[in-house]
Every structure is written in structure tokens, then in C-alpha cells.
Amino acid sequence: MRKLLLTAAISLVMPCTAFAGADFVEGNKTFAADAELGATLTTGNTDTSSYKARLDMKHELGNWENQYLFEGLYKEDTDEVTAKRFFVGVQGDYQINDRSYLFANTNYELDPFTGYDFTSTTSAGYGHRFIDNADTSLKAEIGPGYIYQRLDTETALIEGYESTDSVVAHGVVNFETKISDSSKFQQRFVADWGDKLDARSETSLTASIVGALAMKFAVVVRYNSEPLEGKESTDTETNMTLLYSF
């Protein structure tokens, strides 16, 4: 399993080197991406492994800006899997003017340790850039959404139902600022509020190492106001990863 995950992680990062670090531009098309990779391995008296991978791609075409996000987390302790999370998200933004845009997105998350087989969220609405300059950006999004969650077999037997769904109010706040010529701070908060509150906060600090290679430290907090039986309301995740921009 470790060899398989390590091979997948390397294959994720290798395409980055082929582009040697700059945006791809063809006519009015622009493509850019950030790839992250982190791993921790210990052997001997303690036998653990941890892998974190993320690929964030953006594609601009005229008034449209599309974003594609892939995340994966895997942890193993003495041959026992202790964490496994996979996330795929797609969002399209249509620019109304320099400050305002309309958005539509869909996300799919697999995290068996929450008691759900998967969670699917779709939303659309209005976004606005309150600050947008070379050093600082602040934008927010709000709109209606729909969330569907399917329980795993064991949890479904305990809870007495197989799935749950809800119309939600979807909101996002994303703040990013330059600390120095080689570092930046980012705070992103996402919330879906319907029959319950599902929220995610990511606080990160990125520092350039050399060229397009950087080090990223991030703290992720996930909150569920009504967790399933035997589950916690809050999950936290602390990561140190290498980031390559291309």
C-alpha cells in the first residue's frame, strides 16, 4: 500500500517539472496550477505513515474562470488505516465585471471515518471581490445549495436510515495577503447551513524556497453541528507540504 501511494504521489508531482514553472497562455486562454505533496514515514518501534496530496488548477477563458481541485489524505499506524479522505471539486465563475461574478460548483468527498460513504454538495450564487490588488485579496460568495450524504452500511443500521439530504445556504470567505516578497498568508472559510451546519476553515502560511518551489504550513478544521452516533463534531488536520506552482 505504501509503495502504491508513494508512486501515485510522485506521478502527481512529476508533471509539474515538465512545465518549468510558468502559466500556459494560448490566445486568451490561461492555465495555472499548484501541486502539493507531503509525507511522513517512521519505522522501528513506531511504524506509521502519512501522505497528503493536493492539486489545484485554474483555467481562464474570456469571462469564465474555472477551478479544479483534487485532495487526498491517507494515514496508517501499525498497518491500521487511521485516516482516509479524498475530495474532488469543480467551480466555474462568470465575470460580470472587475469585482462581481456568478459561480456554480459541485464537490464530492469520500471520508469513511465520518460514518458516511460519501458527501456530495452542489451550489450556485453570487461572488464579490472586496479587495483585489497585487498584495491583498478578499472575496466572498453566497448562494443556495444542495447537500446529499449517504451513510455506510454499519452506520445506516445504527441510525435507521441510509441517506440524508438538505437545501442549504452556501457561503465562502477567502482572504489572502502578501507578508513579504517570499511569503503569503491565506484564510479560507466555507459553510453550508441547512438542517445542520457543515463548515471548513483552512489557515495557511506559504513561504518560497527557490523559484516555483515553496513550503506550506496549513491547519484545517472541519465542523459538523450534528455528527453521527459515536463521531466527533470537530476534526482538525495540520499539514506541512511542499508546493510547486506551474
Image: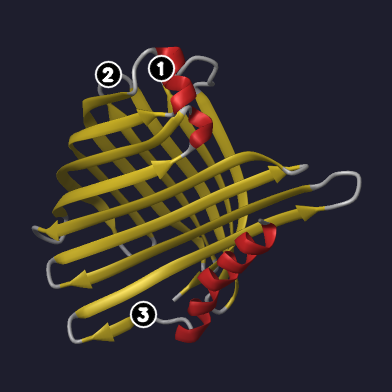
Residue 194 lies, with reference to residue 186, above or below; the image says above
Mark 1 crowd level (few <14, some 14–19, many ≥20, 10 Å Cα): few
Which residue is disc 2 drawn over?
A: 195
Question: Residue 206: where, in percent of width, then height?
Answer: 55, 59
Q: Nearer the viewer, mark 3 or mark 2?
A: 2
| Res. 9 image quadrant | bottom right
Residue 246 picture location, percent across and down? 44, 76
- Residue 42 x %, y %: 81, 52
Q: Is residue 91 left or right of residue 41?
A: left
Residue that badge 1 annotates: 226
Q: CA distance from mark 2 to mark 1?
A: 9 Å
Question: Which mark sits nearer the N-terminus, 3 or 2?
Answer: 3
User: Extreme left residue here?
Assistant: 96
Residue type, mark 2 in image: Asp
Is disc 3 placed on a helix, strand or loop? loop
Comparing 50 with 19, the one in front is 50
Residue drawn at x 42%, y 24% as measured from the top left: 224
Q: Is residue 91 above or below residue 120?
A: below
Q: Is residue 208 visible?
A: no
| Mark whose residue sits in front, 1 or 3 | 1
Compared to residue 165, the image places residue 184 above or below, namely: below
Residue 203 lies, in percent from the top left, at 50, 44
Classify residue 165 as left or right of residue 42: left
User: Of callouts 2 and 1, which one flags the residue occurring earlier in the amino acid sequence?
Assistant: 2
Identify which amino acid the numbered label 3 is placed on: Asp
Residue hosting label 3: 23
User: In the displayed structure, does residue 226 sit left or right of residue 128?
Assistant: right
Residue depicted at x 10% and y 60%? 97
Element on which disc 1 rests: loop
Residue 65 in view of the camera: yes
- Element type at mark 2: loop
